[in-house]
Every structure is written in C-alpha cells, then in structure tokens.
Amino acid sequence: MTRHTVVIGDCRDMHEVPDGSIHLMVASPPYYNAPFDYPGLFKNYEEFLKLLKSLAKELHRVLADGRIAAFVTDDMLVDGEKYPVVADITRIMRDAGFRYRDRIIWRKPEGYIRISRRSGVVLRNPYPMYFYPDNIQESILIFQKGRFDYDYVKQLSPKIREASKINTTRYLSEKWNLAVWDITNVLPKAARLEKGIAAFPEEIPRRLIQLFSFTGETVLDPFLGSGTTIKTAQQLQRNSIGYEIDQELLPVIQQKINHIPHQQQTPNNPIQTEIIRRADAKKLRTRLQNRVKTQKSIIQKTAKLITKPTLQP
C-alpha cells in the first residue's frame, strides 16, 4: 500500500513532514505573475523570491541526504520586463545549501505557441532591433542535498531494486539521456480537467520519479496544483505528499487522484489518501481566472488593431 497526503495550506510551513523523510521533490512554482496563469498574484518580484527562499529552507530540512529537488520553471516576461527566474532559483537553492546538479531543457512542440504576436513584430517591421523570440521551452532545474551514498542501493531488498529498475529501452528510444526532453505540454482543451491551471504534463514527473527515487519512497510537490505529481506517484508505487495553498483546487485534485475517503477503503484498494485542510489556505482560482479573462480581452482587442492594414499616403 502507498500513502498519499494532500495538505491544503502554505508550503512555507511543512510541519506535517518529518526531517529528512522526503526522497524526491518535483514542483512547478507559480509562473511569476504570468498574464495567462497568475496575473497579479504577487505584489512584486521580491515577494515571489521571498516565497522561494522560505521554501528552500524547508526543503533542506525535509529532504533526505543525497536526494533531489527538481523545479520545472523558466524566466518570465511580464509587462515587457524579463525576470531571471532560472538564475534566481539557482542562487536561492545554492544559498540554502543545495548542489546545482543539472539543467534539462523541456522543449515543447513548435506547432503550439501560446503567444506568437511577439515574434510576429518582425513580419510587420522587418528591421533590426524588432526581434523577440517565441518561447517553446522551460527548464527542469536539478538540485541535490549533498551527495548520494550508493551503498544505499546495495542495501535495498532485491524486490525493491527490481521494481525500481529503469526501462533502458524507453530511456534510449525516448532520449531521456539527453539534456533536452521533447514533451508535449498540456494543451488548452475546453473539457480538460486542468482548465485554468498551469499544469505540467504527466511525463515530466513520471521520468523524474523513475530516475531519482525507488519504489516505496516518498515524493513531495509543494505546489501541487491539479495533483499531477501525486497521481504519477500513485501509478509508480511511490508515496507522496503535496501542498496546495488554493483551496478552490481541492475538487480538481480529488478528481485527478481518485480520492477515496478512509471509511470507504477496502483490502483491494492499495492506495491510501488523506486530505488535511489548514487555516492558512486561500481562495485564489476564481479571482485569477477573472483576471485572465480581462487579460485575454485586452489581448484580443490589441490583436485586432495590429492586424488592420496600414493606410498608405
């Protein structure tokens, strides 16, 4: 049986998690004030960094020695200003005592680009200094708490080692061995469960969980969102715990992880889940979605103005 806990509360306080009990962290922090995901969520960039600094301190406490913290994130363009999120997270994690182990580039399909008006400026003004590229990538930043003791693997039972083996055929054919992973993002389909949520595709935590944890170990996601990390941990026979400050996302999380109340569990159900609601939870989703709608309406009006032909004298 694997155990999974959802804490509806602020991840800067993870008192439910004992010291050194987490074997892998997989998380995608809120994209700083992203106009189509989190418009105006933070007062300023310093407030965003303060959140990450507090989280880094808690991560160093709860993560076991030698284990991995993986952030799925990227630099953000907000109101014409580019914010160096990748560099700042790297600095914050190093200052908290972590080693910077690796950076993987998650490359999205070229056929799907959320905003293409940026690069299109060159088509209307084909001159130097008008170029701004469309972004089809994100970074997967890999940090490590100290160094891993590989004698740990030898001490595991043959059953656990066998169950934790990486499928080397997939590893090579899907090119996990490269520092660039081509993975389709969660597309904005009208009926999708994650509508209005900046969710990452299941393939990302699936690879990270297999590459950096063993069967029966515990995976943490401090920014749970729709619950993708817990769902993937369930499928891969890992335990998990996730923190989500937005209590309005709980129904989505419960649907994704097929939450079954304790009193309804049976011996045939190998998954045990628990929901903890804390007083520091907030209501964010409705407010953010309303802001996104306003942002979209502004963009649509702007796009119509841009596409109007220029009158020639």
Image (cartoon, helix red, strand yellow):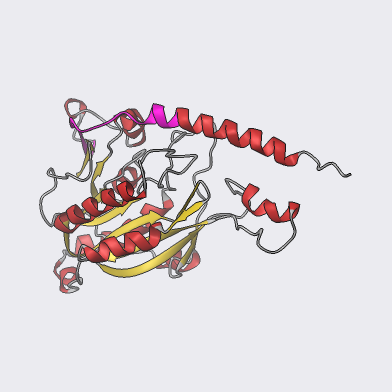
Locate residue 299, reporting x and y percent: 60, 37
Locate residue 109, reporting x and y percent: 58, 54
The reply to whether residue 40 is visible in this rendering is yes
Instruction: Residue at 71% x, 37% y: name it.
Output: 305
Locate residue 158, reporting x and y percent: 19, 65
Q: Image quadrant for the N terminus?
A: top left
Locate residue 296, reporting x and y percent: 56, 34
Instruction: Residue at 21% x, 26% y: name it.
Output: 264
In this picture, which residue range is highlighted in magenta? 269-289
Residue farthest along the front direction in this orientation: 313
Q: Is residue 57 above or below residue 145?
A: above
Along the line of sight, which residue is nearer the eye, 228 or 260? 228
Instruction: Residue at 49% x, 52% y: name it.
Output: 81
Instruction: Residue at 53% x, 50% y: name it.
Output: 80
Image quadrant where residue 62 sits: bottom left
Q: Is residue 148 left or right of residue 232?
A: left
Q: Is residue 125 left or right of residue 85?
A: right
Along the line of sight, which residue is nearer the eye, 115 or 174? 115
Labels in figure, total: 0
